[in-house]
Image (spheres, rainbow, N blue to C red):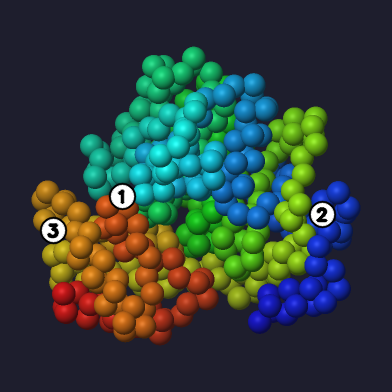
Amino acid sequence: PDVVDVARKQNETLQHSTTIYLHPNIAEYAQALAAKMPGDLKVCYFVNSGSEANDLALLMARAYTGNYDVIALRNAYHGGSAVTMGLTAHRTWKFNVPHSFGVHHAITPDPYHGLWGRDDVDAGKKYAADVKNLLDFATSGQIAAFIAESIQGVGGCVVFPDGYLKHVYEHVRGAGGLCIADEVQSGFGRTGTHYWGFETQGVMPDIVTMAKGIGNGCPLGAVVTTPKIAAMLAQRMHFNTFGGNPVVCAQGTAVLEVIEREKLQQNALKIGNKLLVGLNKLKEKHNLIGDVRGKGLMLGIELVKDRQSKEPAKEECAQILETCKEMGLLLGKGGLWGQTIRFSPPMCVNKADADFLLEVLDRAFRDL
């Protein structure tokens, strides 16, 4: 209600003012958002979506470094624009048009499907070696950037092994590149333990992109970087007609306040842990569930026909989602084959909501 009220009041006075003309709301929001960022990440640019944010981040990296090549991950989703489609490595979202110029995709650091599982303490280092291989064999040795979601969302809620991003960032910075963290889905306390997903890996990116939950549903995205990198972008005119307008900035500020006041990050940890326990119990009951993974309120269960072969159970997944919908539970789907059920509910969900989710899901599996 507080977020809606703020947006309504701002709409009644001034809806639109571009960044050519300064308005108090954009300055106040930028200050509040920057205060949530670690280190020297203090300069904010506002756009309208996650795709726009990643597009701008790529421009920044290429302009600042003078390099062109970019490394992303397989199974990643970074948007559907002409530029970000090239970063995305998921055929569901790719049109048969020219894209991916200068983009190289490293293997997914997936402990469930990959070569090294959760029982390998060096898995992060081993997966990161593929980024080094790309630097050596697919590029000139100098790149513009590496970009990754802190937890792969559309790809099926894939959580990277500990230390993975730390090793990758070392390789990338050794090749002159910047490190971009895509927090469009994992940011703002959703992981429960940390405000930003990249913090779970103990790294400090050079550029952070965000959208979706940033404005509680309004068209708002942001790119946050350092003053040194931002200075390069200031050498030319950068402009976004609707990015950072008074209404979305007022709404964004209200969202930050609500997250703190209602302790939504703590709630994400509490309810997320409850769901993890419940989902693992369902795994013990239903052989169709091959893997349970995630952090906080960004969780996933992967469905397989056989736990040994891990053959994707995409038809069964679709049926379970439909059954859940009929019982009043809306869930997301992810993974290359549509075999993963994703749980990223509003961060205000409570214990009763979690109990309802687990009960409906259990019934859906039993009725299959």
Mark before the other along the chain sequence, 1 or 2: 2
- Three-letter amino acid code of the residue under disc 3: Lys
Report the residue at 76% width, 52% height from top.
241
Report the residue at 33% width, 67% height from top.
276
Q: Can you give x and y, in whole percent of width and height, for residue 39 in the image?
A: 66, 43
Residue with the mark numbered 2: 18
Q: Can you give x and y, in whole percent of width and height, for residue 149 in the image?
A: 47, 46
Q: Can you give x and y, in whole percent of width and height, for residue 230 in the image?
A: 74, 36
Compared to residue 360, the image places residue 104 above or below, namely: above
Which numbered disc covers residue 336? 1
Report the residue at 76% width, 67% height from top.
247
Which numbered disc covers residue 267? none
Q: Quadrant of the N terminus?
A: bottom right
Q: Nearer the viewer, residue 322 or 272?
A: 322
Residue 22 in the figure: left or right of residue 217: right
Report the residue at 71% width, 33% height from top.
229
Compared to residue 9, the image places residue 216 above or below, namely: above
- Three-letter amino acid code of the residue under disc 1: Leu
Q: From mark 1 to mark 2, how far is it between C-alphas?
A: 39 Å
Residue 346 in the figure: left or right of residue 119: right
Q: Nearer the viewer, residue 196 or 318?
A: 318
Q: Secondary structure at mark 2?
A: loop
Q: From mark 3 to mark 2, how far is it between C-alphas?
A: 53 Å
Residue 355 appears in the figure: no
- Three-letter amino acid code of the residue under disc 2: Thr
Residue with the mark numbered 3: 305
Mark before the other along the chain sequence, 3 or 2: 2
Q: Are marks 3 and 2 in contact (CB under 8 Å)?
A: no
Mark before the other along the chain sequence, 3 or 1: 3
